[in-house]
């Protein structure tokens, strides 16, 4: 599984980022995802861990940025996830 890097790790390994894109979710979406991930752990009797895998490419152009900055768009991009994006990781 991937590790969460802090800003110091990012700066040390990759240099100064161009931009930081934040991923948010509603409380309801977080609770539903959490329940699904907990169910994986419970059904495997603690031998597997659930996680959400998101591998994506999206494009942001000047027009998108301008529309976002003027408030026409609520965000620069959206990532939609589906049940098949939930994966399991077996603890060893």
Image (cartoon, rainbow, N blue to C red):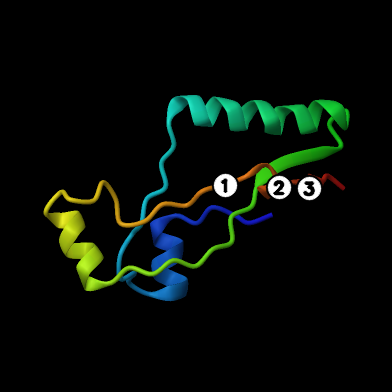
Q: Position of residue 42 (x, y in %)?
A: 81, 26
Residue 51 at x, y = what percent? 67, 44
Chain-order first, disc 3 or disc 2: 2
Q: Residue at x 78, y 47 (%)?
A: 89
Spot occupied by residue 44 in the image (x, y as percentages of width and height): 87, 32
Residue identifier under label 3: 89
**Picture disc at residue 81:** 1
Circle 2 residue: 84
Where's the N terminus, which quadrant?
Answer: bottom right
Label 1: which secondary element: loop
Residue at (37, 75) in percent of width and height: 15
Q: Distance between the residues labelled 3 and 1?
A: 18 Å
Residue 63: x, y in percent?
A: 21, 68
Residue drawn at the location 17% of the way across and 50% of the way down: 72
Which residue is depicted at the point 33% across and 59% down?
Answer: 20
Determine the CA span between mark 2 and mark 1: 8 Å
Q: Is residue 34 left or right of residue 70?
A: right
Label 3 sits on a secondary structure element that is: strand
Q: Is residue 92 left or right of residue 57?
A: right
């Amino acid at each position: 599984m991937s590790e969460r890097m802090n800003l110091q790790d990012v700066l040390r390994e990759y240099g100064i980022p161009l931009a930081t894109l934040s991923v948010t979710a509603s409380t309801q979406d977080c609770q539903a995802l959490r329940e699904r991930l907990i169910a994986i752990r419970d059904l495997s009797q603690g031998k597997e861990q659930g996680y959400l895998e998101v591998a994506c490419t999206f494009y942001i152009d000047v027009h998108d940025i301008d529309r976002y900055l003027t408030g026409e768009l609520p965000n620069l991009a959206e990532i939609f996830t589906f049940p098949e994006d939930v994966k399991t990781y077996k603890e060893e």
